Amino acid sequence: MNRRGAEWRNTLELGSTRGLTTDWYQPIDLADRFFVEPWASVTDSRRDVYVESELAGVYKTFSWQAGLKGGVNFGTSAQLRGELRLGQLDAEPEIQDEGLTLPEFDNVDLGTLAAVYEIDTFDNHNVPHRGTRLVARWFSSLDALGAEHEYDKASLSYRAAHTFGGRHTLMLGLAGGATIDEDAPYYDQFMLGGLFRMSGLSDNQLVGQNAANGSLLYYTKVSKSIYLGCGVEAGNVWNDRDDAKFGDLIWGGDVFVAVDTVVGPVYLVYALAEEPGGGRLRFSLGKNF
């Protein structure tokens, strides 16, 4: 877009979460070591709410947000950045069973700072064969920035892929997050459930102040762009970190077909999970590992 290599990126999301995000990535120097990135987004989402594995309601959230990112690139595979976010949010139950009372939030002011460190050496983000991806984040919602709720969160996610025998790949995934001191409001708690995030659960079926999950996937290339695979997953959420223990993990497994296309990866997945899950068939287009 200019001689320093600026990029204007726009993302449209459809489905249970609908939104539009626009950002302007602007290198400060010709070597693209330092950068700034103003951005803005509007999001309208709905998610199912479960009580003991039974669908009990639908929760909707609408927000507009704007902010600024800035940081430093370490070559082409690592980045350290800070993020400022301001905005406003509405959240309330659209449907809920009698006896269930979900919190309502009206015109909640948002004001947050975050520090993020990323490493990404994947050779292919659609279906990785080798490399790692690590994202470490510290997030603070601050009264000084106008936020109505003050709390801190820390999260870490890690994935590593290794190919052997030319066409066989193992993918290890680990992720976890914790709310520090003050509790996060309902709309910003950790959520678990979804493609390769406990695939046997509904999207964001589990909600809590703390979360952990892991997966080990195997897939093999059967043609130029088609892969067959299977995997095992485990995870859960807890409102109190002291309650977290290995015996609480929910276990699951899946078998899948993946197709590497020019518009992104296509997945057809059949997944199972212990209660509160079950079995489900998933189709996904464009969502990476």
Image (cartoon, helix red, strand yellow):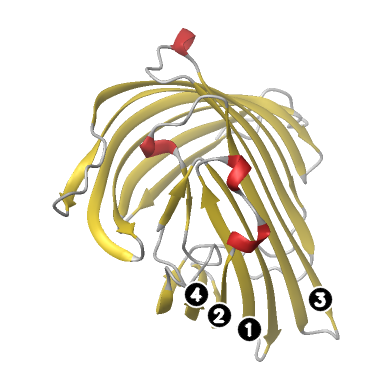
Above or below: residue 224 compared with residue 240: below
N-terminal label among 1 and 3: 3
Asked if marks 4 and 3 touch (Cβ < 8 Å), the reply is no
N-terminal label among 3 and 2: 3
How far apart are the alpha carbons under marks 2 and 4?
9 Å
N-terminal label among 4 and 3: 3
Residue at image mark 1: 229
Front-lying residue, 122 or 216: 216
Residue at image mark 2: 254
N-terminal label among 2 and 4: 2
Tell me if residue 198 can be seen. Answer: yes
How far apart are the alpha carbons under marks 3 and 2?
20 Å
Residue farthest to the bottom, as pictured = 222
- Which residue is at 39% across, 65% downward? 202
Residue at image mark 4: 273
Say what amino acid the circle numbered 1 marks.
Answer: Gly
Residue 156 position, x and y percent, is 67, 44
How far apart are the alpha carbons under marks 1 and 3?
13 Å
Say what amino acid the circle numbered 4 marks.
Answer: Ala
Residue at image mark 3: 163
User: Which numbered mark, 3 or 2, is in the foreground of this view?
Assistant: 2
Element type where label 1 sits in the image: strand
Say what amino acid the circle numbered 2 marks.
Answer: Asp
N-terminal label among 2 and 1: 1
Residue 176 position, x and y percent, is 63, 48
Front-lying residue, 25 or 244: 244
Locate the N terminus by quadrant. Answer: top right
How far apart are the alpha carbons under marks 4 and 1?
17 Å
Q: Please tell me in which quadrant of the rendered image residue 35 appears.
A: top right
How far apart are the alpha carbons under marks 4 and 3?
27 Å
